[in-house]
């Protein structure tokens, strides 16, 4: 990289070259002393007064140069323009060339005029010595080299030629390559320095950029030598590790630096050695990266790579936000969002982890499932917000009373508790029953006090074999047994329950086959007018006669069908069969079919009813559809829309089992209803219990105010019938007082047997 002229050299480099010309002034002092002494000696020896004048010229030139040097020292270098720098270079070149010219003139005069050997030797020696020093002092200015070389050599060459001495001419000719060599050496030095200055600038620029990048990168970086001493550390690393300024840490032992952090409570005292071991494993490749958790919720993820020289490069970043997000996601996956308890899957994992940690521990294990009795009514009465708060309060108490047991939430209103090893079965069962009793009681939610009962079932296992599904089944069987005995009870699993479960599973399989084969049948319970004079409708009831067990109670197989999800298949069968049978009855008798909650989950029921009517030819006015309150729990708005559509087609809509739900009264006004079927509980002991009679009277009055027909179910005695007729409470009566459920062909017979009585009554009138 050759600087041909100052305009192609960067200004700062050009300034440094020119500044070098004005440095090292002691050589000028030594030079002027030698020059003056030599020329004075020549003047005295050769009796040549000219040399006194030349010596004076040396002194004057030296003084002028020193004054110029001092002026240059006072100048603010960074404010100089390129033209200013070039002007100062010119000042220097004038002074230097003047000195060289005096030397050249003195040497030429000695050669051509004096011809004194001493004078020639002294002048030429001083001149040649000055020429040699030109390279070391004036490399910064090519003009100074060229003009000084020319000023020194040209007078000697000219005077040697003018002396007409062949040998002098030969010697003078050698001055030409000498001058060129001097020039080349000076240029070489200047170019070498120039290239080094440029290289240094580039290295400095790269170093600055590297330093900027290093200290602005989002990752911490530490480079250590084979002895684990810090060679490079960036600012981010110091911030993350809180270990001071990077400049103070160079050549410090990394372990000592981390222990310094431990001393000031940034890391635990045991962590520095652990961190170093883990980083060593990462550097050796046995681990790809390592996550280290530090105090103040700081998580750093390290990666490392071993260098060829045995050192290592460590790169790490703050992943605290990512770790927190992952922990939050993991918590969402593992824990119930409402109660904060482990969900079913994580509960099973916690239990398995416990068993894995204690493989040799002996003693029975307990598994209890808890169900909140009638919790859905809290949501119905108070709303889901209050229900959720109550559920959280119950979950908190379950967790508190469970003690060292593992608690989880299975679903909805069910909780599960795992009781670890106890000394014996009696102590474990006592602990389970105590926990169940403590969890029941009063709860506060939204400034309302609730008296909560919980049904529970538990299983006790002798050994460490754990299968979540198996234990759940056994506890569920015990829970079912507990609920069958009443609310708030608790029951333990017994082997007989297991047998009943197996039998129940077989019964489910047989029911599925029976439904698929159309092996169910329908019977009908007629609804009479209150005076018994006429049958207006008959309710279709499904019946199943098992080939081995005989008749299966409807409440048993209907519940199984709902659990299995095949209740809609039964509805389809009964609907078609009922419509077909109704076509064989007298035209004034309608048929009533029950719909389940599953039937009303979508609009398929509309198509099903239309197909049944079309297939059998039954008029829509002769079809009644009955629903219960449970049909409205999940999506009441959608159910209302379906019922409204059915009613618009001429189908009669009835609400069944009215009075058994908490919010039944509100349905009378909001649902598209025609008939209210009052539950049998209203007429049970009606003759002895006046409160029941008052409730019946109020319900009837409310229904009639809304224009609804009234059917009273479960009327079994003539006393009940007499009271109902006396109060004029019913439009239709359904119960054993008139008829039990009968086959389809009996409906026509029963209706025909009433006609003579009706005619006699009409004649008497």
Image (cartoon, rainbow, N blue to C red):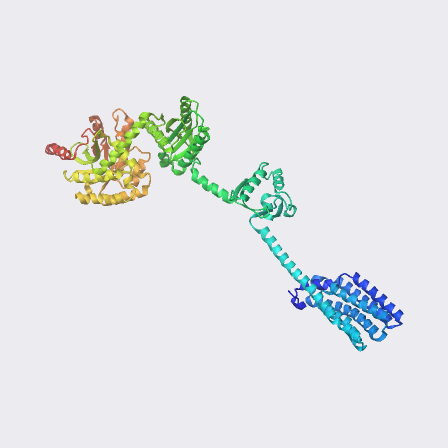
Give the answer, above or below, for where 148 lies relative to 680. below
Residue situated in front as seen by the camera: 339 or 55 = 55
Q: How many marks?
A: 0
Q: Is residue 574 visible?
A: no
Residue 271 in percent (x, y) is at 57, 38
Q: Split into 4 quadrants, where in the image is the N terminus? A: bottom right
In the picture provided, is 242 more to the left or to the right than 655? Answer: right
Residue 4 in percent (x, y) is at 66, 68
Give the answer, above or below, for where 160 lies relative to 289. below
Q: Image quarter for residue 633?
A: top left
Q: Image quarter for residue 717?
A: top left
The residue shown at (58%, 36%) is 270
Q: Is residue 223 visible?
A: yes
Residue situated in front as seen by the camera: 185 or 654 = 185
Residue 544 in percent (x, y) is at 21, 33
Q: Split into 4 quadrants, where in the image is the C terminus? A: top left
In the picture provided, is 238 more to the left or to the right than 330? Answer: right
């Amino acid at each position: 990289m050759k600087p041909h002229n100052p305009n192609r050299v960067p200004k700062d480099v050009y300034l440094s070259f020119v500044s070098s010309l004005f440095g090292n002034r002691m050589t000028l002092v030594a030079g002027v002393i030698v020059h003056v002494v030599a020329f004075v000696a020549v003047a005295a020896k050769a009796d040549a007064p000219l040399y006194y004048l030349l010596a004076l010229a040396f002194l004057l030139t030296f003084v002028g140069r020193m004054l110029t040097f001092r002026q240059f020292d006072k100048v603010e270098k960074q404010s100089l323009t390129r033209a200013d720098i070039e002007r100062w270079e010119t000042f220097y070149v004038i002074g230097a060339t003047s000195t060289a010219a005096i030397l050249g003139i003195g040497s030429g005069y000695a050669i051509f005029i004096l011809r004194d050997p001493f004078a020639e030797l002294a002048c030429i020696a001083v001149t040649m010595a000055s020429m040699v020093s030109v390279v070391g002092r004036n490399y910064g200015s090519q003009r100074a080299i060229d003009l000084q070389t020319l000023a020194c050599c040209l007078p000697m060459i000219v005077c040697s030629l003018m002396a007409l001495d062949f040998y002098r001419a030969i010697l003078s000719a050698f001055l030409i390559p000498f001058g060129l060599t001097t020039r080349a050496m000076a240029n070489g030095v200047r170019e070498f320095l120039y290239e080094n200055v440029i290289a240094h600038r580039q290295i400095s620029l790269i170093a600055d950029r590297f330093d900027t990048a290093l200290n602005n990168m989002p990752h911490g970086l530490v480079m250590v030598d084979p002895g684990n001493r810090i060679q490079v550390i960036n600012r981010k690393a110091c911030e993350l590790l809180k270990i001071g300024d990077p400049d103070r840490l160079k050549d410090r032992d990394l372990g000592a630096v981390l222990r310094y952090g431990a001393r000031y409570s940034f890391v635990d005292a045991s962590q520095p050695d652990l961190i170093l071991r883990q980083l060593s494993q990462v550097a050796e490749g046995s681990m790809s990266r390592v996550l280290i958790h530090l105090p103040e919720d700081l998580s750093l993820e390290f990666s490392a790579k071993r260098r060829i020289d045995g050192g290592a490069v460590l790169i790490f970043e703050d992943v605290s936000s990512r770790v927190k997000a992952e922990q939050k996601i993991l918590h969402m996956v593992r824990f119930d969002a409402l109660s904060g308890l482990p969900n079913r899957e994580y509960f099973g994992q916690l239990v398995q982890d416990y068993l894995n940690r204690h493989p040799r521990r002996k003693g029975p294990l307990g598994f209890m499932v808890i169900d909140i009795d009638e919790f859905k009514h809290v949501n119905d009465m108070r709303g889901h917000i209050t229900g959720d708060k109550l559920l959280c309060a119950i979950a908190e108490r379950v967790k508190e009373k469970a003690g060292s047991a593992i608690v989880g939430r299975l679903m909805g209103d069910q909780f599960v508790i795992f009781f670890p090893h106890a000394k014996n079965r009696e102590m474990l069962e006592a602990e389970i029953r105590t926990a169940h009793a403590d969890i029941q009681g009063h709860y506060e939610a939204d400034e309302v006090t609730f008296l909560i009962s919980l049904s529970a079932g538990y299983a006790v296992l002798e050994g460490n074999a754990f299968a979540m599904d198996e234990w759940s089944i056994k506890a569920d069987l015990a829970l079912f047994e507990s609920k069958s005995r009443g609310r708030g009870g608790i029951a333990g699993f017994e082997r007989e329950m297991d047998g009943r479960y197996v039998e129940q599973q077989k019964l489910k399989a047989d029911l599925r086959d029976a439904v698929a084969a159309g092996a169910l049948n329908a019977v009908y319970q007629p609804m009479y007018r209150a005076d018994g004079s006429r049958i207006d409708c008959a309710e279709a009831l499904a019946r199943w006669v098992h080939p081995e067990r005989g008749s299966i109670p409807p409440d048993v197989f209907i519940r199984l069908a709902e659990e299995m999800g095949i209740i809609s298949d039964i509805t389809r069968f009964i609907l078609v069969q009922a419509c077909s049978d109704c076509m064989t009855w007298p035209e004034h008798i309608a048929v009533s079919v029950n719909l389940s909650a599953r039937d009303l989950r979508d609009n398929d029921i509309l198509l099903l009813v239309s197909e049944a009517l079309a297939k059998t030819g039954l008029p829509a006015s002769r079809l009644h559809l009955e629903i219960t309150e449970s049909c409205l729990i999940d999506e009441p708005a959608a159910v209302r829309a379906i019922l409204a559509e059915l009613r618009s087609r001429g189908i009669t809509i009835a609400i069944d089992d009215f009075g058994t739900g908490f919010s039944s009264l509100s349905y009378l006004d909001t649902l598209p209803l025609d008939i209210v079927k009052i539950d049998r509980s209203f007429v049970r002991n009606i003759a002895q219990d006046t409160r029941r009679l008052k409730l019946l009277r109020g319900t009837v009055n409310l229904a009639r105010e809304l224009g609804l027909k009234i059917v009273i179910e479960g009327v079994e005695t003539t006393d009940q019938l007499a009271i109902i007729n006396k109060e004029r409470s019913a439009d239709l009566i359904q119960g054993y007082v008139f008829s039990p459920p009968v086959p389809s062909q009996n409906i026509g017979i029963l209706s025909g047997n009433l006609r003579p009585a009706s005619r006699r009554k009409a004649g008497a009138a």
